[in-house]
Amino acid sequence: MATTEEYVTNKQIKTRLKRSAGQLDGVLRMMDENHPCEDVLVQLSAVKSSIDKAMKLVIARNINNCVDAMTTADVQNLEHSLDLLLKTK
């Protein structure tokens, strides 16, 4: 698992969001081309997962910026908690 310091830059978050936007554009094309509902839903699920990951990055960056005295183990525990939270959405 990556540590917070490895993925807290704006550039990395924007890259994730641009990837999500590209996936969503693909879903729109699939709909224009009358792809089956199941295929569209699979791709929408991928978009949702990508957005959830972007949200985790933003939250992790905020936590890292707000709490300077955390140990690496504390950061990893928070990341794990964030992963669990996003999986339960």
Image (spheres, rainbow, N blue to C red):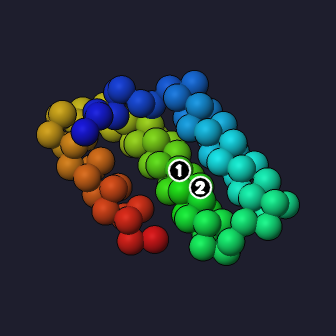
> In this orientation, does residue 66 appear?
no
Which residue does the image show at 46% across and 71% down from the upper left?
A: 89
Residue 26 vs residue 77, the one in the foreground: 26
Quadrant of res 75: top left
**Residues at marks 2 and 1 touching, judged by CB atoms closer than 8 Å:** yes
Q: If the image is split into quadrants, where does the N terminus sit?
A: top left
Distance (Cα) linking label 2 and label 1: 5 Å
Q: Which residue is mark 1?
A: 50
Residue 37 or 25: which is nearer the viewer? 37
Badge 2 amino acid? Val
In percent of the image, x 52 and y 29: which residue is there? 12
Badge 1: few (under 14), some or many (20 or more) residues near its Cα, within 10 Å?
some
Is residue 32 or residue 17 the one in the foreground? 32
| Lateral position of residue 8 relative to residue 40, left or right | left
* Disc assigned to residue 47: 2
Residue 82 on image: x %, y %: 35, 55
Q: Quadrant of residue 21?
A: top right
Residue pictured at 79% horizontal, 54% vertical: 29
| Residue type, label 1 | Ser
Q: Mark 2 falls on what kind of element?
A: helix
Q: Which mark is residue 26?
A: none
Residue 37 percent location from the top left of the image: 67, 74
Horizontal and vertical percent for residue 3?
Answer: 28, 33
Q: Is residue 78 left or right of residue 11?
A: left
For the residue labelled by badge 1, is the local secondary structure a helix, a strand or a loop? Answer: helix
Label 2 packing within 10 angstroms: few (<14), some (14-19), many (20+): many
